[in-house]
Amino acid sequence: MDLDAKLVACHSEKDQAAPTHKGGFGFHSLLCFRASTGEALSGWLRPGLSGANTAANRIAVFCETLAQLPDAHRHGTVTLIRADSAGSAKVLAHVRDVRKRGIRTFFSVGYAVTEPVRRAVVDRLWHLALDQDGTLRGGAEVAELTGMVDLDGYPASTRIIVRREGPHPGAQPSLFDQDEAAAA
């Protein structure tokens, strides 16, 4: 499952539409899609200024998404939840808590790039990355930062694994991406 917020512009006064934090007008929707098919499983049209890091909203959409799954799938299949860095420690703790109900959940979330993370990335020993089928992923490397970055507030046994690779077509590298490319 992919869980993410997205700004949706509208050009008229729709119910609950509001100014956005980027100067537009519309909604700050929170959506969950099935990653393998792109099928929409659950979502909320929130007002434009709704917070991106609202743990309570993310937990509610996650719970609604689980409710959409047939019992056999919800209880019989491992479910990976992917989110960006707004997948806060509270959301991750909730994803782990649903395991107590027999739902096998795991997560993969982005982590904010802070100065300690930047130093850890530069200092790490990088290893060649693999694709899901076990073959080498050309031009990509991975490193583990667990133990080098403060994980207070995150569930026990949380790990930080980072990947680096060249930008995908159409990507706009950040300044940090450009510094890394120059150093490589």
Image: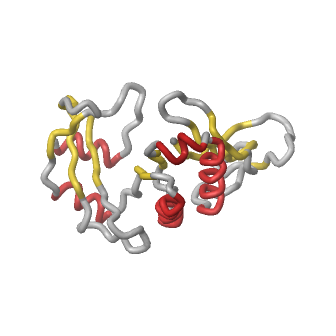
Residue shown at the point (16%, 58%) measured from the top left: 123
Q: Quadrant of the C terminus?
A: top left
Query: In terms of depth relative to the viewer, which is nearer, 183 or 43?
Result: 43
Pick the residue in front: 86 or 96: 96
Q: Is residue 53 left or right of residue 89?
A: right
Residue 134 in percent (x, y) is at 21, 33
- Name above or below for residue 183 compared with residue 171: below
In the image, residue 60 lies at what x, y percent?
Answer: 65, 56
Q: Which residue is depicted at the point 46% across and 55% down?
A: 85
Measured from the top left, where is residue 57 in percent x and y? 65, 57
x, y (%) of residue 56?
64, 62
Q: Which residue is painted at 86% across and 44% down in the image?
A: 15
Q: Is residue 29 left or right of residue 126?
A: right
| Residue reaching furthest to the bottom | 152
Q: Residue at x 32, y 63 (%)?
A: 115
Q: Nearer the viewer, residue 104 or 95?
A: 104
Q: Looking at the picture, tell me which residue is in the foreground, 184 or 8.
A: 8
- Colour scheme: secondary structure
Count how many numbered circles sit on residues in the image.
0
